[in-house]
Image: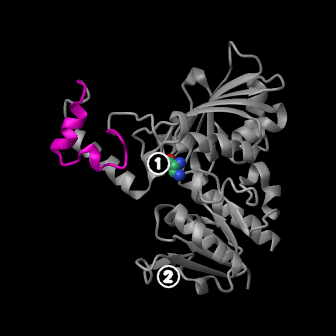
Amino acid sequence: TGPVLALVGATGAVGTVMVDIMNGRESVPWGEIRLIASARSAGKKITVRGEELTVVALSPEAFDGVDVAMFDVPDEVSAEWAPIAASRGAVAVDNSGAFRMDDEVPLVVPEVNSDQISNRPKGIIANPNCTTLSMMASLGALHREFELRELVVASYQAASGGGQAAIDRLRAELEAVAGKDVGVRAGDVREVLDAAGLPVADSPFPAPLALNVIPWAGSLKDEGWTSEELKVRNESRKILGIPDLKVSATCVRVPVVTTHSLAVHAVFVREVTVEAAHKIFAAQPSIVLVDDPAAKSFPTPADVVGGDPTYVGRVRQALDFPNALDFFVCGDNLRKGAALNTYEIAEGLADRL
Ligand code: 2RA
């Protein structure tokens, strides 16, 4: 016995991490775990907690008897199927962008606004975008104490935010440039990629990613902003419950496979010190503070990938801005940034069913 959990998108990049997370848990509250994917992946076998499960095809009937359905599928698939799951009695926990800004759908980061889990008129709960999510535990904790007023961030986003094809592309580009005297003349990276049969026109990224950084993530929105930058603004406001929070974001893709980082400049209503911020971060179970400048100790994606917590370092009191802190955050975008947060919401639901 125990509630029935469905995982929709079980064979995708994030779905695979969700299975890993469930396999790594000491115990799970579920009486049954059902794996659901597109008809193409139906019939695949995946071992979950020692039991070999067969992936079933997405259909309305697949949700019969399901209490909680975690979705990690493209926006348009969620838009169609999360309401179907809800109409069959499941609570849908959706990791797509389809419902995040819907007023009737809570956008939840458990350590910041878990109270919102019960407020779900549509039977749907949304999981934030991984870029926003990577800094929410730290900002939520600081906001509780000092009241956040303004936020200026630059992201350093990993390729895997773009899915498996984006990871494959970065690896292929790295292989093409490895050991070559390249990156020394304008356009030479593109030439090497062209010669390797990897023209940028075929890439999920709008420029070479190997030996480069790309100030672009998502799609073009009004006045030159990208969808990703607007998500950071709108989702931060909704999660933190500060509708008029001033936010400015620049989202940048970097040649990292997995783990998003953000440089954060946060302005508060009340006076804030590095010492007080350190204490607040250290008290958060989901944050690891790595901040010893003299020892050159700070978080980097290479050191934190694969972990569940958010890592925070380089905490500084802004020299020229009152009540402002600057700091650097790293979080595994596939784990806390996607699969783990979704699973934590599902676990929270299991407790309340
Ligand atoms: C990205 N945040 O990194 C997106 C994925 N949801 O591309």
Residue occupied by mark 1: 258
Residue most extreme to the top: 320
Looking at the picture, how far across and down is residue 57, in whole percent? 49, 82
> Quick one: SS at disc 1?
loop
Closest to the observer: 76 or 64? 76
Residue occupied by mark 2: 57
Q: Residue at x 60, y 31 (%)?
A: 153
Image quadrant assignment for residue 216: top left
Q: Is residue 168 left or right of residue 221?
A: left
Three-letter amino acid code at disc 1? Thr
Looking at the picture, how far across and down is residue 78, in whole percent? 58, 67
Image quadrant assignment for residue 214: top left
Circles 2 and 1: CB atoms closer than 8 Å: no
Q: Residue at x 46, y 76 (%)?
A: 38
Residue 287 in sight:
no
- How far is disc 2 from disc 1 in space, using C-alphas? 29 Å
Q: Nearer the viewer, mark 2 or mark 1?
A: 2
Q: Is residue 207 magenta?
A: yes
Residue 176's tag is none
Closest to the observer: 24 or 319? 319
Image quadrant assignment for residue 145: top right
Three-letter amino acid code at disc 2? Ala
The magenta-colored residue range is 185-208
Q: Residue at x 24, y 36 (%)?
A: 190
